[in-house]
Image (spheres, rainbow, N blue to C red):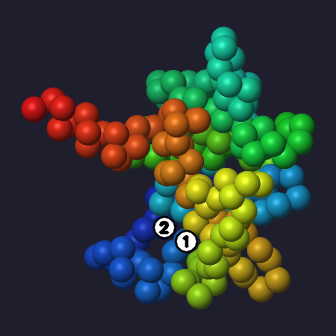
């Protein structure tokens, strides 16, 4: 499986524009029958699922916390968060450790597939489904051969009010301005 993702940004790219020109790497994973993907640059490591310490009164999708090399990090179950049925924890269940604006957290997924390079013409905007489904946290839909990937904007999802795990960029700039 995956050992480390530290070498994924070694293209010597100088700007986001350069990165978009050759494409963007995503880590694909499964939740139920669907395949999702997140920006590989947000991934710190991939670990097997282990028991967590539950936190009283936490939302159901927050499984608890683990001690990762001296850092206590929250673990979220994305299957519960996205209401995709009852999660099953087995030998394929993994935790993707993320670094979102300096905050470390883990997400539980059914399995990790692979790292996929998508260029702009392989990414389609999410469908308009305002009433039925919130698409604010989607980058779009990625297509690779006959596979369809749901591309999650993990920064927006984790900094959303309902998650409350990471301060949004606009919140932190307001706080900095109020300190002066």
* Residue at 68% across, 58% down: 130
CA separation in Å, label 1 and label 2? 8 Å
Point out the residue furthest to the front here: 131
In what element is the residue under mark 1?
A: strand
What residue would you read off at disc 1? 25
Q: Nearer the viewer, residue 159 or 106?
A: 159
Where 44 falls versus 53 (above or below)? below
Circle 2: is it few (<14), some (14-19), or many (20+) Cα within 10 Å?
A: few
Where 175 falls versus 66 (above or below)? below
Residue 142: give x, y in percent of width and height. 67, 75
* Residue at 59% across, 55% down: 137
Residue 8: give its label: 2
Circle 1: is it few (<14), some (14-19), or many (20+) Cα within 10 Å?
A: many
Residue 138: give its label: none
Quarter containing the C terminus? top left
Q: For this view, does 100 lie left or right of residue 151?
A: left
Callout 1 touching callout 2 (CB < 8 Å):
yes
In what element is the residue under mark 2?
A: helix
**Which is more N-terminal, label 2 or label 1?**
2
Q: Is residue 55 visible?
A: yes
The image quarter in which residue 120 lies:
bottom right
């Amino acid at each position: 499986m995956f050992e480390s993702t530290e070498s994924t940004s070694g293209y010597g790219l100088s700007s986001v524009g350069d990165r978009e020109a050759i494409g963007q790497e995503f880590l694909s994973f499964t939740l139920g029958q669907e395949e999702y993907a997140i920006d590989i640059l947000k991934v710190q490591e991939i670990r097997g699922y282990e028991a967590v310490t539950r936190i009283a009164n936490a939302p159901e999708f927050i499984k608890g916390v683990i001690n990762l090399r001296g850092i206590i990090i929250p673990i979220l179950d994305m299957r519960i968060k996205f209401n995709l049925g009852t999660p099953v924890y087995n030998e394929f269940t993994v935790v993707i450790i993320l670094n979102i604006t300096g905050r470390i957290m883990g997400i539980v997924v059914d399995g990790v597939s692979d790292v996929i390079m998508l260029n702009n013409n392989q990414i389609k905007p999410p469908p308009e489904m305002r009433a039925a489904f919130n698409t604010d946290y989607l980058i779009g839909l990625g297509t690779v051969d006959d596979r369809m990937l749901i591309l999650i904007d993990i920064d927006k999802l984790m900094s959303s009010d309902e998650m409350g795990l990471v301060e949004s960029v606009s919140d932190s700039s307001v706080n900095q301005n109020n300190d002066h």
